[in-house]
Amino acid sequence: MRADRLVSLVLLLRRRGRMTADTLARELEVSTRTVLRDIEALSAAGVPVYAERGRHGGFSLLPGFRTELTGLNHDEALALLTAGSGRGEQAFGLGSALASAMRKVVDALPESHQTTASDAARRFLVDPETDLLARRLVTDRVPGTTMSEVRRAVLAGHKLRIHYAATGQSPRWRTVNPIGLVTVRDRSYLLATRAGEDRTYRLTRVLAAEELPEAAERPNQVDLDRIWRERSARFLSGSDHVTVLLLVDPARREELLDTALAVRAEEPDADGRLRLELIFQDARHAEWALWQLGADAEALSPRSLRTALRDRAAGLAALYASPAGAGREARRPAADRRVTGR
């Protein structure tokens, strides 16, 4: 780890010129004292780092110094810089490692291409935090210490002990055999086995984790894509899930798909709307999702969903048909009103 940090320190100084110890510490996510020790180590190794005193002082490299790194062509560097520009940099807790890698990518370019590639990468934006409707996209945030333990166990092939808060249950410790990590639509999952059974854990529900020294019980070779497809299929076949056939205004399509578990079919309808077959968590989830879209979506089936939406709309219509403030009374059954003389 220290060797990587020393390389990152040199690359920072090459790219930005003079930098203070405090600024270097923030960039490298270490203490100022660690930066000063690293500067001493670099000087002892023959790297020409020198200090400038005073108000605008800091550390610099002698002009012309260049590290020996493997070069990349312009398009290769641009592809990596673009991939690292989105929110994917937070996947599996590798944000700081990606920042270090990006510095190495830029430094590996010929000097004549460095500015061009960096400027070109700024023209591409991958997965901004909000969409055009200013809705903030929700991204899983997992504590760095927890993510590091999980990641190490996955890569080392060791058993993992996790303190997991399953939905509707009190958190408890369990020991699993980690298989791999998957991130999809900004949500991250740990694929594992436990007591011989397949298990999928949402990483935001892992409250703490501990890598164990024992070897995990898992195959040496793994096809994560196939495993994920199989587990997704099993999840979608759950008994509580409900399949809904509906029509939706194309302008509201993405908003609707953001709430559904899966899309089974999609085709244009004769009236300009889209005909979709979607899977929702349960009947309440489906009712809530379609209610958000108002008249821009119409459930065709199941009939129970149409009935639930009709009753909800009738209740709202009755509320606003009454004088202001009389809504609760208007919704009481007629028999109850007669008993109280109202």
Image (cartoon, rainbow, N blue to C red):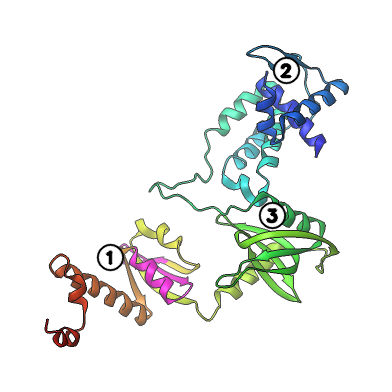
Residue 96 picture location, percent across and down: 68, 40
Residue 280 picture location, percent across and down: 46, 71
Q: Which of 249 and 216 is in front in this view?
A: 216
Up/down of 32 relative to 282, above or below? above
Q: What amino acid type should be assigned to the residue bearing mark 2? A: Ser
Q: Name the residue under label 1.
A: 295
Residue 195 picture location, percent across and down: 76, 76
Disc 2 is placed on an element classified as strand
Give the residue displayed 23% in from the left and 70% down from the top.
316
CA separation in Å, label 1 and label 2: 63 Å
Give the residue displayed 64% in from the left and 71% down from the top.
231
Residue 203 appearing in the image: yes
Q: Is residue 261 left or right of residue 32?
A: left
Q: Which of marks 3 and 1 is nearer the N terminus?
A: 3
Q: Nearer the viewer, residue 335 or 227?
A: 335
Q: What amino acid type should be assigned to the residue bearing mark 3? A: Thr
Q: Which of 89 and 52 is in front in this view?
A: 52
State which region is magenta. 267-292
Q: Mark 2 points at which residue?
A: 60
Please name which of the two marks, 2 or 3, marks the residue nearer to the observer: 3
Residue 241 picture location, percent across and down: 49, 77
Screen quadrant of the C terminus: bottom left
- Residue 287 painted magenta: yes
Q: Which of marks 1 and 2 is nearer the N terminus?
A: 2
Residue 146's tag is 3
Give the residue displayed 69% in from the left and 28% down from the top.
24
Q: How crowded is mark 1: few (under 14 residues within 10 Å), some or many (20 or more)?
A: few
